[in-house]
Image: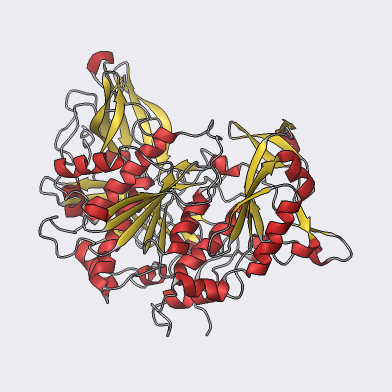
């Protein structure tokens, strides 16, 4: 069968991402095979800070890659109209057809042991072998020196050139992840205050509005001649469900019952179940019952104390947001939280654990990298996991990022990854107005410029944040986007995968109310605050898909082909610039918790910013649009 996914692989100019073993692997009589592109792009002489101590600990995974054409099978089962559509493989069936041979795994283990490494773990799908040792052992085994490099304000370890493996493993080793520290550049995509989410206590300041435009800033200067409304205090589950047409929690026909959503983040909040049940009780949701919520950690993840660059409390806030967002949209669904014990090279293992064990039919991920310029050891393994997910009928959703086109952060225009993967449903962010009766008022692209009140006038702080999107530089345009995304696909010449695919509210100015135990000056206790980011958009949409799966009576799996089949229909609300709403005024406590330090005021604008553009129909700011309630559910149930 000919696959409809004619471009679900990287474009030719970077084809090495799909086949990282260099041509030199076959060049006899060399005893070594070079893994081209395994050194990260930032490991340059200009960034070099010094050599890495040979005694430093290093943990890594050697990825083996699938046997056969797993991508063709994944495409067939995900394509409406295909004879194989919906005929998903079980994890056991996938392993039987595509998993690396045990003899290949044993060969890798034997070599690692001969080099002095400790072999930790191999998952049941044989996708990788995890090991750990010292930098000195890694230098000898992989034939490179290691250095410390300055990148994005951090000093990170990396091999100084492409690594190599014995020629006997050339047809076996696909990629190596963890020798460099590119994973330290990962970030969660949520925004609460003007800092990453609440490591310490944070409260919304008054005045704020209970619904869009309830209160106006009549005592503050006008902005561009307009009296602006105050930001919302944070939309409740009832408000979000009403705006997106899912109905009242108590009377809705579908609530996600019988469906399972997995959430992947780093770490695990020690108060998550208590916090979510308190949040549910206060905001009209049913509390989790019995085994409806579970928290697991994938086996084989690295447990070294390498967390000096990490923010466990921030990730706790991310978990809280994700769980409460899914539960708000699909209060009947089961939620499985899988927390990597660090956010270095363990998020991939957590995703592989969910997919290989078949723990859920929907997986939402609210993290990513602000660029696609990563070593092959990152990109190729993730792609293999995503292909297995699609073959098994598991839909994987990623937030599209919070830095717009990334020009203000990276210095060049780029999509975020893994959101840019053609095997991912990338979820972008909007600014949402919800009315007094929980009615939908408007939506625009979430793009924010900030203006601060100073000396009685508004002073520009410039661009502040925005939902991610754009065109991939490394992945070609997938067939499901053909004829729909063409006008955006050629930004960099040729054709590229465009994101996001869909969107939901993400703007913290119109964000969701969440509840979490926090550290306040007078103690640690539960409180609620407004939060946003595409970290909100992705789990909200995952909850909507759980409802859609329930209504359809079957999982949609990798949903992009089905989602694009409804392009331009009533299934979506098109997101275009607003002719009425230009922004809102936000009041913040100067000390984040109370009036003791006074209030600070700022204007947060709404709509297009930087180079991402909202227009009628599909665009690179909001994709196909936002789900239009029951019309969306009914369209996907066909």
The spot of residue 414 in percent (x, y) is 54, 49
| Residue shown at 72% from the left, 58% from the top | 110
| Residue shown at 43% from the left, 74% from the top | 78
The spot of residue 68 in percent (x, y) is 61, 75
Screen quadrant of the C terminus? bottom left
Q: Is residue 444 left or right of residue 33?
A: left
Which residue is more in the foreground, 5 or 339? 339
Q: Is residue 506 left or right of residue 628?
A: right
The spot of residue 99 in percent (x, y) is 57, 69
Callout count: 0
Q: Is residue 6 visible?
A: no
Q: Is residue 274 left or right of residue 120?
A: left
Residue sitting farthest toward the right? 29
Q: Is residue 53 above or below residue 410?
A: above
Residue 225 location, quadrant: top left
Q: Is residue 7 visible?
A: yes
Q: Is residue 575 above or below residue 484?
A: above
Which residue is more in the foreground, 155 or 97? 97
Which residue is more in the foreground, 212 or 119? 119
Q: Is residue 523 left or right of residue 27?
A: left
Which residue is more in the foreground, 379 or 165? 165
The spot of residue 528 in percent (x, y) is 23, 34
Q: Is residue 278 above or below residue 31?
A: above
| Residue shown at 51% from the left, 76% from the top | 73
Q: Is residue 461 above or below residue 180?
A: above
| Residue shown at 64% from the left, 36% from the top | 156
The colour style of the image is secondary structure
């Amino acid at each position: 069968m000919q696959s409809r996914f004619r471009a679900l692989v990287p474009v030719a100019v970077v084809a090495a991402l799909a086949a990282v073993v260099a041509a030199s692997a076959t060049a006899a009589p060399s005893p070594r095979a070079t893994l081209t592109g395994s050194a990260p792009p930032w490991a340059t002489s200009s960034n070099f800070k010094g050599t890495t101590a040979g005694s430093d600990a290093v943990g890594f995974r050697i990825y083996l890659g699938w046997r056969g054409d797993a991508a063709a099978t994944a495409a067939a089962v995900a394509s409406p109209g295909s004879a194989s559509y919906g005929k998903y493989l079980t994890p056991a069936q996938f392993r039987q057809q595509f998993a690396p041979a045990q003899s290949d795994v044993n060969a890798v283990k034997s070599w690692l042991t001969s080099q002095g490494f400790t072999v930790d773990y191999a998952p049941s799908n044989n996708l990788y072998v995890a090991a750990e040792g010292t930098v000195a052992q890694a230098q000898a085994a992989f034939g490179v020196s290691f250095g410390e490099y300055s990148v994005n304000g951090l000093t990170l370890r990396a091999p100084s050139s492409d690594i190599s493996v014995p020629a006997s493993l050339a047809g076996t080793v696909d990629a190596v992840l963890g020798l460099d520290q590119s994973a330290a550049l990962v970030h969660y995509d949520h925004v609460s205050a003007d800092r990453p989410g609440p490591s310490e206590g944070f409260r919304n300041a008054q005045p704020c509005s209970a619904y869009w435009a309830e209160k106006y800033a009549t005592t503050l200067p006008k902005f561009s001649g307009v009296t602006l409304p105050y930001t919302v205090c944070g939309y409740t589950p009832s408000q979000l469900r009403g705006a997106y047409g899912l109905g009242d929690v108590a009377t809705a026909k579908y609530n996600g019952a019988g469906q399972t959503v997995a959430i992947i983040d780093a770490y695990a909040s020690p108060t998550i179940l208590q916090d979510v049940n308190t949040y549910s009780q206060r905001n009209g949701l049913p509390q989790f019952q019995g085994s409806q919520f579970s928290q697991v950690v994938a086996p084989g993840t690295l447990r070294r104390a390498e967390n000096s660059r990490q923010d466990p409390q921030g990730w706790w806030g991310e978990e809280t947001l994700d769980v409460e967002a899914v539960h708000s949209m699909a209060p009947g669904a089961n939620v499985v939280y899988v927390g990597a014990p660090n956010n270095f090279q363990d998020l991939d293992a957590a995703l592989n654990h969910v997919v290989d064990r078949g723990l859920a039919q929907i997986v939402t991920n609210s993290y990513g990298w602000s660029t696609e310029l990563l070593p092959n050891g990152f990109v190729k393994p993730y792609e293999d996991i995503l292909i297995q997910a699609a073959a098994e009928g598991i839909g994987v959703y990623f937030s599209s990022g919070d830095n717009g086109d990334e020009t203000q952060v990276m210095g060049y225009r780029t999509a975020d990854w893994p959101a840019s993967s053609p095997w991912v449903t990338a979820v972008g962010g909007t600014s949402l107005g919800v009315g007094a009766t929980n009615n939908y008022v408007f939506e625009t692209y979430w793009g924010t410029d900030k203006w601060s009140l100073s000396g009685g006038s508004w002073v520009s702080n410039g661009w502040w944040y925005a939902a991610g999107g754009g065109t991939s530089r490394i992945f070609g345009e997938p067939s499901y986007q053909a004829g729909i995304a063409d006008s955006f696909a050629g930004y960099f010449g040729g054709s590229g995968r465009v994101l996001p695919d869909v969107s939901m509210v993400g703007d913290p100015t119109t964000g969701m109310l969440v509840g979490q135990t926090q550290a306040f000056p007078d103690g640690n206790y539960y409180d609620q605050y407004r939060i946003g980011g595409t970290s909100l958009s992705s789990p909200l949409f995952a909850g909507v898909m759980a409802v859609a799966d329930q209504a359809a009576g079957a999982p949609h799996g990798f949903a992009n082909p089905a989602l694009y089949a409804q392009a331009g229909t009533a299934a979506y609300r098109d997101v275009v610039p607003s002719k009425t709403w230009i922004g809102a005024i936000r009041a913040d406590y100067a000390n984040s918790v109370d009036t003791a330090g006074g209030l600070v005021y700022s204007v947060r604008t709404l709509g297009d910013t930087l180079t991402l553009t909202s227009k009628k129909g599909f665009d690179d700011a909001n994709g196909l649009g936002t789900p239009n309630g029951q019309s969306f559910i009914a369209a996907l149930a066909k």
